[in-house]
Image (tube, grey):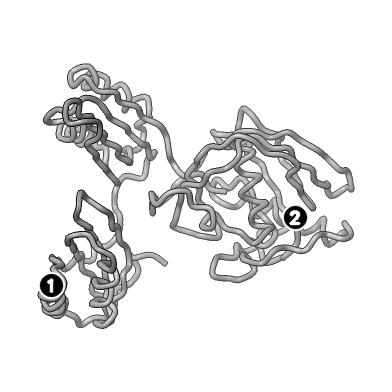
């Protein structure tokens, strides 16, 4: 269990599509634990993807249950390996920030509903229907696994640079 | 890194405006580039038929605004760009507004005098800081409609509901629609 340093752009690992996890072993489970610790240590963070801690694998963790936008509609802590979005619908714009792109925010359009399939650390394959803020968080973290940042999806030129104290 | 951490740099606010044409940004940025200035922050947009640029630029100290003014005067003679340069003190370089909620306020209705003034005065008197503001006159000459959209940083403790209630009286008085929504960034 460890809080890992967050990698920031221009580190090119953030722009590199991640490798599929071929085998879930103790090393991968340790990676998941570290991602959870790192997420909990981040100010108001609701998700961390492996490349953000320097590991180019399709693994991320998400938990929007403590965020005001997600507290009433969430699946709790999700430990996500080899995720795949099977369907998406709807569209809404939200202003996003990212620990890997500090001091900058941008409006990004995301699907409002999606179906996600992923494998958990114990090997269980899950399929969930996510919506609202949780769906936004899933798309943001999965973008990291594809080597994309929110900067690649800016929906308008209205961006901000605000000191951000809390997102709860 | 942000603008607040560069004590070795001199900063200037540069305002440039000129009749819109292709290449206006390239002309202005060429002056800055050849002088060795960096564009730290900028906002450029069309206003009517004019293209307006507001930039925060920096240069290693020592550097005076006279050099900027001289080169822009030369460019102005050739291209018709008008430039105004103001040196910035250290405490003017970075954003120092409130750090509470950020909200987007839309105001629209039949055009009449005083919409911008009344709305912004109401907000200012309650400590609400405007971070971004755009207005547009739309509709037809016989039926003009005024649209005002602004982003406002609220003082700590003030909510979107507080702002909505605050502007309710103005809504009736000016016969305009006013909507307020939260746009505080989410950290993902």
Apparent side of residue A92 relative to residue B142 in the rendered image (left or right): right
In the figure, B161 relative to A70: above or below?
A: above
Q: Chain of mark 2?
A: A
Nearer to me, B54 or B166: B54
* Tag of residue A100: none
Q: Residue at x 18, y 28 (%)?
A: B111
* Neighbourhood count class around disc 2 (C-alpha, 10 Å): few under 14, some 14–19, many 20 upward: many
Q: Position of residue A89 (x, y in %)?
A: 64, 36
Q: Position of residue B178 (x, y in %)?
A: 30, 25
Apparent side of residue B72 relative to residue A120 in the rendered image (left or right): left
Q: Which residue is mark 2?
A: A59
In the figure, B176 relative to A124: above or below?
A: above
Quadrant for residue A104, please give it.
bottom left
Q: Which residue is mark 1?
A: B76
Q: Residue at x 84, y 50 (%)?
A: A121
The mark closer to the camera, 2 or 1, is 1
Q: Residue at x 29, y 71 (%)?
A: B26
Q: Position of residue A60 (x, y in %)?
A: 71, 52
Quadrant for residue B113, please give it.
top left
Apparent side of residue A5 relative to residue B23 in the rendered image (left or right): right
* Residues tagged by mark 2 and mark 1 found on one chain of the structure: no
Q: Chain of mark 1?
A: B
Q: Position of residue A120 (x, y in %)?
A: 83, 46
Residue B122 is at least partly visible in this image: no
């Amino acid at each position: 269990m460890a809080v890992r340093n967050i990698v920031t752009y221009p580190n090119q690992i953030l722009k590199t599509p991640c490798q599929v996890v071929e085998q879930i072993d103790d090393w991968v489970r340790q990676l998941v634990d570290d991602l959870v610790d790192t997420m909990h240590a981040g100010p108001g963070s609701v998700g961390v993807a492996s490349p953000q801690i320097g590991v180019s694998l399709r693994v991320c963790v998400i938990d929007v249950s403590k965020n005001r936008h997600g507290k009433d509609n969430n699946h709790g802590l999700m430990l996500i390996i080899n995720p795949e979005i099977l369907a998406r619908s709807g569209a809404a714009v939200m202003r996003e920030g990212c620990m890997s792109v500090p001091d900058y925010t941008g409006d990004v359009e995301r699907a409002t509903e999606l179906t996600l399939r992923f494998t958990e650390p114990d090997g269980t394959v899950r399929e969930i229907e996510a919506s609202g803020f949780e769906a936004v968080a899933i798309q943001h973290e999965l973008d990291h696994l594809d080597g994309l940042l929110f900067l690649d999806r800016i929906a308008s030129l209205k961006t901000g640079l605000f000191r951000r104290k809390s997102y709860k | 890194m942000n603008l607040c951490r560069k004590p070795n740099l001199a900063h200037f606010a540069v305002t440039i405006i000129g009749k819109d044409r292709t290449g206006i940004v390239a002309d202005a940025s060429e002056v800055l580039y050849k002088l060795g200035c960096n564009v730290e922050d900028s906002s450029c947009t069309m206003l009517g038929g004019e293209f307006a640029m507001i930039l925060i630029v920096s240069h290693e100290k020592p550097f005076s605004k006279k050099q900027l003014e001289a080169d822009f005067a030369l460019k102005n003679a050739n291209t018709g760009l008008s430039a105004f340069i103001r040196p910035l003190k250290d405490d003017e370089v970075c954003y120092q507004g409130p750090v509470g909620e950020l909200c987007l306020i839309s105001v629209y209705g039949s055009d009449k005098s005083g919409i911008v003034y009344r709305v912004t005065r109401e907000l200012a008197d309650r400590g609400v800081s405007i971070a971004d503001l755009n207005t547009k006159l739309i509709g037809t000459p016989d039926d003009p409609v005024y649209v005002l959209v602004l982003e406002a940083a609220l003082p700590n403790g003030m909510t979107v509901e507080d702002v909505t209630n605050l502007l309710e009286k103005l809504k009736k008085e000016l016969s305009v629609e006013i909507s307020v929504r939260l746009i505080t960034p989410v950290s993902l």
